[in-house]
Amino acid sequence: MMDTVIDHLNEASIESGIGESVLQAQGLNIWFAQESGESRHVVKDVSFDLRAGQCIAIVGESGSGKSVTARALVGLAGQGATVAADRLALEGETLLDRPEAWWGSVRGRKIGFILQDALVSLDPLRPVGKEIEEALWLHKWGTRKTRLQKVRQTLWDVGVPEPDLLVKQRPGELSGGLRQRALIASAIALHPDIVIADEPTTALDVTVQAQVLSVLKEMLGRGTSVILISHDLAVVSQLADIILVMQGGAIVEAGPRGEVLGRPRHPYTQQLIDAVPSEHTKGTRLSPHGGAVAQTLFRAERADLADSPVPLLDARGIVKSFPGPGGLRRTVVKDVSFTLARGETLGIVGESGSGKSTLARIALSLERPDSGEVRFLGRPWSSASIADQRAIRRRISVVYQDPLSSFDPRWRVSRILSDAICLQEVMPRGQVEDRAVHLLEAVGLSAAHLEQWPLRMSGGQRQRVAIARAIATHPEVVVLDEAVSALDVSIQAQILDLLSDLQVQLQISYLFISHDLGVIHHMSDRVLVMQNGRAVEQGTADDVFRNPQHAYTQQLLASLPRLEYANLRKAAAWS
Amino acid sequence: MTASTTEFGRPQADQKTVPRSRIGVPRLPVSIWLSGLVVLFFAIAAIDPSLLSTHSAFETDLLNTLSPPSVGHLLGTDDIGRDLYSRIVWGTRQSLLIGLGAMAVALFGALVLGFTAALGPKWIAGPLHRLLEILLPFPILLLALLFVALLGPSATSLLISVGIGTTAGYARLIRAQALKVRKSGYVEAALALGHSERTIFRQHIAPNAFRPLVALVTLGIGQSVVWASGLSFLGLGVAPPSPEWGALLEAGKASITVAWWLEIFPGIAIVLVALSFTQIGRYVQDRSEGNLQ
């Protein structure tokens, strides 16, 4: 298997006519010592050959070993790590068993390393300019004056509009995109031949992501080699020449971009590609696993619902502001109106700070709007008294991005569920447990999970428990606030499938909030696009995504990296 | 890097689902064993002193005044020939009761004030918070002195004074915890489910805010014993001839030049109790902090 992979890689490099080898790994293995004394084999026999001007992307889900691999290449595999390889060489020099001092001269100068989270990677108390200058100073580059010049030049190169201002600012004063670019600048200031980028765009909005990707693209054009670590196939498809797919520490598929994405040979690669939600996946299942939901749940039938022409939720002219710095009020939602009909999904999409989460909290009546009103089935909801609101609350539930923090740390799954079940009606203990088990089965878990601590469950399992709690009270509306954003793509696919199944079966309406345009398009019947607190565009999902009217929507869609190859393949499969 | 994430497919039900207690069965360090023994000894002394004492605590023996520690009198005798060891044993109940009682008073006051300052209506929560902040820099001893002066010296007033003196510190901690828990995701989730504020307080805020304080309470008992003895020593608490430990110190100070044991041994008793409770409190604290987050 490995031989064919390497052959394939060499072939691919020759085909793309790219320069000589700069970084080679053959049979790279990494173990971590564990407390128990055993060691965990986290990277297994990884091989690749990075050539000048080439971009190799390592793709995989959390726990696949992709980040550890990247860190081992700059001598940062971590405490208790054992790194072994048949060959691990940078321009002919081995990288194995090097002292820390030697690494100091390599990092930054020969290999630049871009970390995922710029907020924690930059010193919060130091101006950004100082931080980048230090990288130069460490390598004894130039004089103070030329260094400052160099810093400004580098910031300009990575697309910072006002380098002179940025060098004086601290990381906390910058937006996510500027921060990430500052971090890239500090990694590439010395023009290293190789840049390793570990999830460089993961926490960023799409428009900012597009900017960061274009910076990396430019660097590739100038002959820098890039190793890109990502879980996002769409991002990878923009840059990579070669794609390595990792699963459980081993490379399961490797090859040129077009082949891996267009004609995946390994079932895992196939699953990864299929799991990406987009306009082409609408109405289809994303995950090959798990059939329809077990038929154990009852639809909520209430007298006031029967064929009511009144929308479930009707929000009119919502305005909400919060006190900001300097005594000024910041208006985060500006005159937004929407309706939500029974069994329908309304997707609310926007970038961070667009006010979509505040809108969700107002829809849940956890926040009262300054003006405007939300009505539930024609009755007052946002303006109702606390007692009246409580009577409606069980009919509108919520699933958050981080389920763990929404569970009391002292409670096991059984208590979390029975707490919601008993809200509806008082029933004997055995019946509560039966219903809890039904709910767990409906979300793809089982009775065995009843006595578990959420802390010890995986992210996907926790989100399933959160969904089970949300449907326990027979709600008509579920607000999903970035409910799948923190999950790996295959887990996300399972959860999205689950939500679609539940919707069909229970006739629930979803208010689906996400920054991910693909997810929104996949799930939504109608879409509301938010920018700076305003609803700039509203319409059916297909209309908004295929024929966007507002400039901002057009910009969002243009920034969205697309998985071209996969879509071509799907189109071919359809015809 | 969670290995527990199942890649694709339904999460497996047959993975390790055996519920484990959050604290597990730790192997106790030696210091905790020793502290436990000390606490056990004094607990027995407090419940039934006659089990441990060798003499009566009040019977005088004028032929054996101020005799140094010996086989007949393990820790020696005082100026009117009473057996010091037996007096310390008989005094345990009162000293410990003052310590525990003071802690109980402090805790009760702190719970009421702390939760009110965190969750009460603005017109009361605001001033209360300020008051707690003003009280904080006052030395505990000084506050207690004030209350003893108001109530007159007795075991009860000692207990109340030390309790009130330490209330403000605990109240501030409870307030901070309650505010933190109130902002948590699970409180919001409970609110969204439609629970009443009272239920949310009972189910989530009170237990989660109190949890980190369990360790502090254990620490505080030892502290209270020290404060109470200190006040008795100053003549502001229980007066001789009571064998309360602070009173023993007070009574012995006149003869300190000829009978060192009258000061040293009651002192050691106080230190042992305070140290043992502190050790146990620290241990509980470490365990719970390691497991809470």
Image: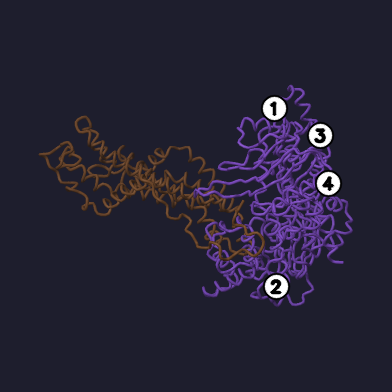
Chain colours: A purple, B brown
Where in the figure is residue B247, as x and y percent of width and height? 27, 41
Residue B57 or A120: which is nearer the viewer?
A: A120
Q: Are dots 2 and 1 in contact, CB under 8 Å?
A: no
* Kind of residue indicated by mark 3: Trp
The Cα atoms of the two marked residues, 4 and 3, are separated by 34 Å
Q: Name the residue under label 4.
A: A15
The Cα atoms of the two marked residues, 3 and 2, are separated by 54 Å
The Cα atoms of the two marked residues, 1 and 3, are separated by 21 Å
Q: Which of marks 3 and 2 is nearer the N terminus?
A: 3
Mark 3 chain: A
Q: Earlier in the sequence, mark 1 or mark 3?
A: 1
- Tally the marks: 4
Report crowding for label 4: few under 14, some 14 to 19, many 20 or more residues within 10 A (C-alpha): few
Mark 2 chain: A
Q: Is residue A524 above or below residue B100?
A: below
Q: What element carries label 1?
A: loop
